[in-house]
Image (tube, helix red, strand yellow):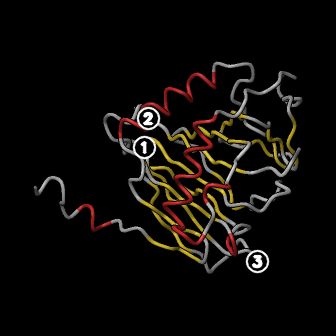
Amino acid sequence: MSTLFGDELLSRPRREIAPGAVHVPGWLRLDQQAWIAERFRGWAAGPVPPRAASVRGHRMSVRTVCLGWHWQPYRYTREATDVNGARVLGFPDWLVRVGRLALAEAYGDDYPAREYTPDTALANFYDSEARMGMHQDKDEASREPVVSLSIGDSCLFRFCNTETRAKPYEDLLLASGDLFVFGGPSRLAYHGVPALYPGTAPPGCGLEAGRINITLRVTGKA
C-alpha cells in the first residue's frame, strides 16, 4: 500500500498555475510514455527529418518534427519548404483522443473537451544542451488551448504572463509523464525552458537521455 500512495505523490500536486494554465504531474503512465517515444522515433525517420529552426537569424537548439502542418517561424505549411520540401506526416487520430482526454483532465466540465480537434503537433527533442527562449505560441489563427506532454529528462519550465517575458513569472519542474495545458486567459502567455536536468529520465519511459516535448495545437487553417 505504501508504494502505491507514497509521499512522492504529495510533493508535486496538480496545480492551476494561472487562469487557464494547468499542470498535471504524472499524467502519462510509463508504458504510455514509452509507446509515444517509439512513435516519435518513427516520425523522426519519416519524410521530413527533425530540424532546428532559425528564428530572427538565430538557430534554435531544440530540434522539431511536425505532424499535420509544418511549423516554420510565423506560419504553417503542408510542405516543409525550409527543410526538404516534402509533405509532413498526417496528424494521427490517437493524438486527437489524447488532446481531448488532456483537456477533460485539466478543465473538467469547464471546457467542451469533445470538440477539441488539434490538427498539428510540434514534437521537440531537447538534448542536454538545448534550451527554449521565452516566447508566445501565436502563429496559430485559432486560440484553442495548447496541450503539452513531456517524456524523458526533467526540465525547468518558466511560465510568464501575456504582456512580458520578464518577471513576474513562475518556475516549475516538468518531469516525464507530465501534462501542461494552457488556454483561455493564458493562451498567449510567454513561456520557455531555461534548463534541462540530464540523467533524470525514469527507467521505462522509452528515452534514456534527453527530453521529448509534444505540443498539440489547433492551427485554424482549412
Distance between the alpha carbons at the discs numbered 3 and 2: 34 Å
58, 103: nearer the viewer = 103
Q: Residue at x 68, y 42 (%)?
A: 122
Give the mark, 3 or 2, whose residue is nearer the N terminus: 3
* Above or below, 73 relative to 8: above
Kindly report the distance in space between the C-alpha atoms of the residues bearing marks 3 and 1: 32 Å
Who's the residue at 82% across and 47% down the image? 55
**Is residue 214 left or right of 8 when viewed as pictured?**
right
Mark 3 / mark 1, whichever is N-terminal: 3
Residue 96 location in percent, x, y?
A: 62, 43
- Dot placed on the residue nearer the N-terminal end, 2 or 1: 1
Circles 3, 1 touching at the beta carbon (< 8 Å): no
Which disc, if any, is residue 10?
Answer: none
Secondary structure of the residue carrying tag 2 is loop
For disc 1, the marked residue is: 198
Q: CA distance from mark 2 to mark 1?
A: 7 Å
Left/right placement of residue 20 relative to residue 199 reads right
Which quarter of the rendered picture does the C terminus lie within?
A: top right
Relative vertical location of residue 95 with respect to residue 102 in this rendering, above or below = above
Labels 2 & 1 near each other (Cβ < 8 A): yes
Q: Amino acid at mark 3?
A: Glu
Kind of element beneath mark 3? loop
Q: Amino acid at mark 2?
A: Ala
User: Tag on residue 163?
Assistant: 3
